[in-house]
Amino acid sequence: MLTYRGFVLSLALCMFMVQAMHVNAQYLEEDEELEFLQAEAWNEQEMFATEWLSEPEALLAEEFLPIRAWDDRVPVGFGETLRRGLVAGGYSVMKNTLLMYFNITVLQSPWTSPRADTIHHNLGGPRNWKWEDKDGFIVNHIGHPFQGSIYFSAGRATGFGFYSSAFFSAFGSVTWEVFHEGLTASINDMLITAPAGMSLGEILFRLYLQGHSAGVPAPLLFIFNPAAGLHRLVTGWEPPAAERNLYEFRAHLGVGYTSVDYSIYSSAHPLVPDGRTDVFSDTGLFFDVGLHVIYGDPFAQSTWVPFRHFEFLVSAGTDLMRHTDFRIFSNGYLFSFSPLRAETRALSTGLSLFMDVAIVAGLDHRGGFEQIGGLYQSGTINMYSNALGWSLKYRHLFSPSVGLRSRLHAGFTFFGGSLYYHPVDDPESEQIERLNYGYGISLRHLSSLELGRRSRFDINNFVYFQWSFPGTGEISRGFVWWQFHDFTFSHLVSQRISLGATFSLAMERGRFEGFPDTRKNHWSVRTFVAWNGNNIRAPIEGRR
C-alpha cells in the first residue's frame, strides 16, 4: 500500500509540475515583488517592456499602481472572518465525514464506527486521551500529515493566513479524534497532524497557486489539493494571481540496485546468545520517481511572510516485491533576512519549519517480519521529524561557469517518531508493531557545485538524534538516530533533459531498554533521467 500511495503522489506531482513549468519560472529578489506585480499590471495595459528585468531603473521611474502581493493579508471585519471560518470548518468536518464513511463501508474495521460512549469519553478532554503506540507507521506519519494539510488548505483557500490556518489543522484533528472513530482519542495523532499539516499544507497550497497561474487543468489541481479544489468548485472562488516563483524544479525517473541489512547486538540479551544476530538482508533492482522543488530564491530572502521560500523533496522507489523507499524532506522560512547581497555572493538566514519522513524497507516473504526467538523484527528504517530550527543559505559565484550553493540547517525536533516491534511469547500470536515518540536535534547540509554550463554535483546530508518521551508507550525508554546521505552527479543533454547517477546511504541505530541494540543499513546506486523546469546553471547567476 505504501508503494502505491507513494507512486500515485509522486506521479501526480510530476504531472502537475511539468504542466506548471510550461511557463518560464522567475524568482523575486529582495524588494522586487511589487516591482514584478507592477510589471504584470503594465502588461495588462500594454505598457510592459519585455526586457524589464534587465532595466529595473526604467520601471522605477514609472508611476506605481497600488498593488498588494497575494500573500500579504488584508484585514477584514469580524463578520467576514466568522463567515470564512465557518466555511473552512465545514470543509474540515466534511472531509472527516467522508473518510469515516469510507472506513466504515470499505474497510469495515471495528474501530471505524464512532459510538456514543467513546464520544462522551473523548469529550472529557485531554485527561481522557491516550498515547497510542500500536498504529501503523505509514498511517500515522504519512496519512496524518496529509490529513492535516487538507484542514490547513481549507483555511488558506477561504482567505486565512499561515498562522490562523493552523487553527483548522488542529480543529480538524480534534474533531476526527473525538467524533469520527470508535476509539479513545490519541494525543500523538493530534501532535502529528496539526504541525505537519502547516508545513505540508502551505507547500501544497502555494504549488496549487503556481499550477493555477500556469494553466494546469482544474481536475488535476483538485487531486493535488482537495480543499482548495472543493472551495473553487462550490463557491466559484478564483485563486489569486500568484507570481511565478519556482526557483528550481527537477522531476526524475530512475532505476538502480539496492541492498538492505539488519542486525541486532547485545552482550546479555537471551535473544542474542552470540552477541550479534543477522536478522535480515536483501539486494535487488528497483526503480523510483521523485521531485525536487525550490520555491523562491533561497539566498536573497528578507521577509516576515512564512514560506515565501521553501524546499520540497519527495521520492518513492520499489521493486514491487520486497523493497520500498519513500521519503519527504521539507523546510520553509517562517521569517528571514539577507545580510549579504553582492554581485558574486548572496546569503540569507532565518527561522525554518521542517517536516521529514523516511521509510526505507526490505521486506521478507512474510510481509516484513523476521522472528528471532520471541522478538519480531523487520528490515525497515522508519524516521519522522517535525522540527523548528535556524537556516543559513549561501551562494557563491567563483566564475561565470563555476558556482557553489549551500544550505545549512540546525533544528530542534519537537515531535519525532520511530518504530520497534513488540516481543511476544507465542510465535503464532499477532505480530504487532510498536511506535515510540520523542524529541531531539536534526542537522542538515545540502550543497550543489555547478561545473560549467551543464554539469552539477549535489551532496545532501541529513542526521537526526531522537530521545523518547518517557511513559508514552511500551517501548519508550531509549534513543535512536538516523543518517541519510545522497551524492548525485547530473549533466544536461538538452535544454531541459539531464542524465545522472546517485549513490545513497541510509542508517538507523536504536538502543532501547529491554531490547537488543539494532543496526539497520541501506545503500543504493541508481541512474536517472530528469526533466528540469529551469536550467541547472541559472540559479548561481540569479534566475531571471
Image (tube, helix red, strand yellow):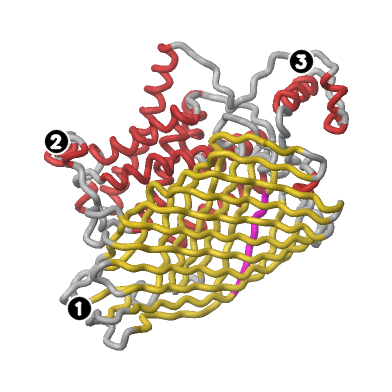
* Residue that badge 1 annotates: 427
Residue shown at the point (66%, 70%) measured from the top left: 527
Q: Does dot 2 land on a helix, a strand or a loop?
A: helix
| Quadrant for the N terminus in the image | bottom left
Residue 260 visible = yes
Residue shown at the point (78%, 61%) measured from the top left: 455
Span highlighted in magenta in the image? 249-256
Horizontal side of residue 434 vs 290, given as left or right = left
Horizontal side of residue 353 vs 494, given as left or right = left
* Residue that badge 2 annotates: 120
Query: Against 46, is 197 above or below?
Result: below
Residue shown at the point (22%, 54%) measured from the top left: 471
- Residue found farthest to the left: 117
Horizontal side of residue 518 vs 51, given as left or right = left
Residue 509 placement (x, y as % from top left): 41, 69
* Residue that badge 3 annotates: 64
* Residue 472 lies within the magenta run: no
